Amino acid sequence: MIGRLNHVAIAVPDLDAAAAQYRGALGAQVGAPQDEPDHGVTVIFIELPNTKIELLHPLGDDSPINGFLQKNPAGGIHHICYEVEDILAARDHLQDTGARVLGDGTPKIGAHGKPVLFLHPKDFNGCLIELEQT
Amino acid sequence: MIGRLNHVAIAVPDLDAAAAQYRGALGAQVGAPQDEPDHGVTVIFIELPNTKIELLHPLGDDSPINGFLQKNPAGGIHHICYEVEDILAARDHLQDTGARVLGDGTPKIGAHGKPVLFLHPKDFNGCLIELEQT
């Protein structure tokens, strides 16, 4: 069912510093910051040859990653995203196995403009997993 | 400098349960457990089309991931691994930028039989980063 690893998302306390570090110290191809007001984050994409790293920084007081950065002030890996071909079929299959989908189970449109769902980290070895329909 | 994302490593409290979940609920291609006594872990590789997930479980009382699982009993993302062409050049460049390399800076032979180094998570947004020479 799951396909490619679409991205690894890293929440960072200082977006400019993290971008400069990935560009300079790690020598990666780092994009420009993009505000995603619908998702409460500013995102920078780092293009690796086979996948992407997403640097996430809170945008606004209600950002969904404010709590994460309060618990992890230095930052940390926030989630990983797997691609699926059919997100509704994936959701139904996962729920049949007893896994919890966050929210009401209705896919939302993610930062890439595609339908996404998140799975409960307590059901997946402490990892927040995003599924994105490709 | 950094190339492909070689893998994402997830520390799990129950290796059999995690493997069954990735095979069944997530429908992934899951390998057999491999004991790595030199690294104090048992590893299961999950092959995605573009990269790998490594499930890590402690092997022995001195496992380097015992502490992580004590802090995170449900499991969690332990590290991410970027490929580099020349690990000594990468180390020297990173140290020139002020980043700390764990241990004495001498690459060790990792679970894939290739030279690896780990970077200090406090210097990299709370993420433990492994570099592997390809």
Image (spheres, coloured by chain):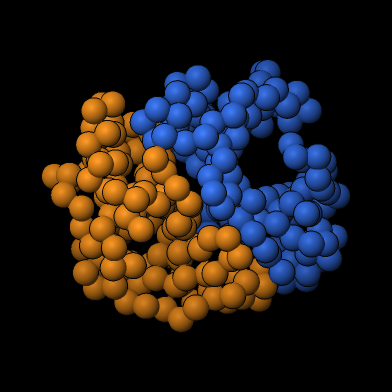
Chain colours: A blue, B orange
Where residue B13 appears, as percent x and y from the top left, is 44, 65
Asked if residue A77 lies left or right of residue A2, the reply is: left
Report the residue that reaches farthest toward the left. Answer: B104
* Viewer-nearest residue: A108 or A49: A49
The answer to whether one can see residue A66 in this image is no
Residue at image position (66%, 76%) is B24
Residue at image position (58%, 60%) is B50
The answer to which image quadrant residue B99 occupies is top left
Where residue A107 appears, as percent x and y from the top left, is 83, 48
Tell me: residue B51, above or below residue B14.
above
The answer to whether one can see residue A82 in this image is yes
Q: Quadrant of the N terminus of chain A?
A: bottom right
Residue at image position (70%, 22%) is A35
* Viewer-nearest residue: A96 or B45: B45
Residue at image position (23%, 28%) is B96
Tell me: residue B120, above or below residue B60.
above
* Viewer-nearest residue: B97 or B11: B97
Asked if residue B82 lies left or right of residue B102, the reply is: right
User: How many marks overall?
Assistant: 0
Q: Quadrant of the C terminus of chain A?
A: bottom right
Where residue B120 appears, as percent x and y from the top left, is 30, 39
Where residue A12 appears, as percent x and y from the top left, is 50, 29
